[in-house]
Amino acid sequence: MQKKLLFIADSLKNIKPNSDSSLALAQAALENHWEVFWCEPNHVHILGSSIYVNNLSQLKSVSMSEINYDSNNKKILPLNFFSYCFVRKDPPFDENYKDLCWILSSQSEVKIVNPAENLLAFHEKALQWRALAEGFLNQENIIPTCLTNSIEVIEDYCNQNQSLIQSGIVCKPWLGHGGEDVELFKDKNTFIKYLHDKQKYQKIRQRIMVQPFLSEIYTEGDRRVLVANGEIIGDFVRLPAQGKIASNLAQGGSALIKEMTPYQKEICLKVASFLKQKNIFFAGLDVIGSRIGEINITSPTGLRTFEILTGRNIAKKAFSLLVN
């Protein structure tokens, strides 16, 4: 009997096959003779005491240039119809995303990548602090951060870290994603004035992250390291577009292959071990110099980018590791 894989992700109509990692994994599954199905988060339900899905599309073929699928499946199927479920919904991690995770975490029969309860438990902008707390990382591997919605706390942080913020201050939303709304300020006074001006018109309700600007982002870039089931399967460097500080490819950044330093590899292997211990099966580490910026676990990207840069299809290896 053919094994069946379900993706819970954004609409297929809005996904580009030449850049999407979910489709790279789907292609690998099809090439391994799996049946591959796709639905959106609002097509996941609880009926009685079991999870069901509807409005399914069945993928027939996937390549860098196109997707062929049948969206005429009107059946409502139990989740345990599938051998595996890959949750690949892009952020923001909002109430709808939480609802999906709460529903999926009510079952234990079908293996979910990444487990819904872990998506609820760990914020990808904070997971490196947990790795630090458990001894996998050192303080020198973490970006000193202020996370708050209080201007007074931010001022105190800036005053206590004046030597660290000499190159500038980065501000980004706690619930942001994809490099959106990341801003750079040249000094404390400019930044605090901006916050006070913003406060006049709109109270700062959501937490923001404040960090020192790491100038090597312009020279060394931001390294994306892909980890599957505790193994590093590939990495590449992203450089920000001119006039920007976010290196995300979605923000116009460029990518290149550059070998990791031995120390960077040592750090990433430690994080990979930590993730495996936490049953986080697929992740994308963002590394600046010797520091871990974020650990993306909601919908890690980069499989297609690595393939374009190197000609190597690591999605096949990722898929094999994720379903074993």
Image (spheres, helix red, strand yellow):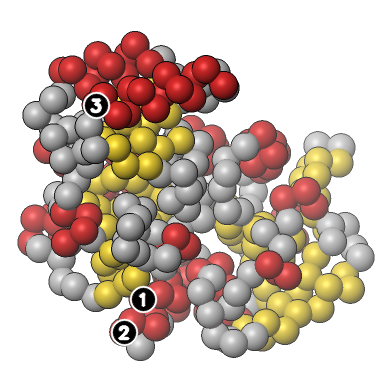
Residue 195, image quadrant: top left
- Percent x, y for residue 251? 44, 60
Q: Is residue 133 visible?
A: no
| Viewport quadrant of the N terminus | bottom right
Residue 302 can be seen in this image: yes
Kindly check if marks 1 and 3 are in contact, taking CB atoms under 8 A apart as contact.
no
199 relative position to 188: left or right: right
Whole-number angstrom distance, CA of label 2 to CA of label 1? 6 Å
Badge 1: residue crowd in 10 Å (few <14, some 14–19, many ≥20):
many
Above or below, 36 against 263 in this view is: below
44 left or right of 14? right
Name above or below for residue 286 compared with residue 261.
above
Residue 268, located in which quarter of the rendered image? Answer: bottom left
Q: Residues within 10 Å of mark 2 (few under 14, many from 20)?
A: few
Residue type, numbered disc 3: Lys
For label 3, the crowd category at 10 Å Cα-Cα, with few meaning under 14, some 14 to 19 and many 20 or more, is some
Residue that carries the numbered disc 1 in the rendered image:
306
Which type of secondary structure does the marked residue at label 3 adopt? helix
What amino acid type should be assigned to the residue bearing mark 2?
A: Thr
At x 37% / y 31%, what residue is drawn?
Answer: 209
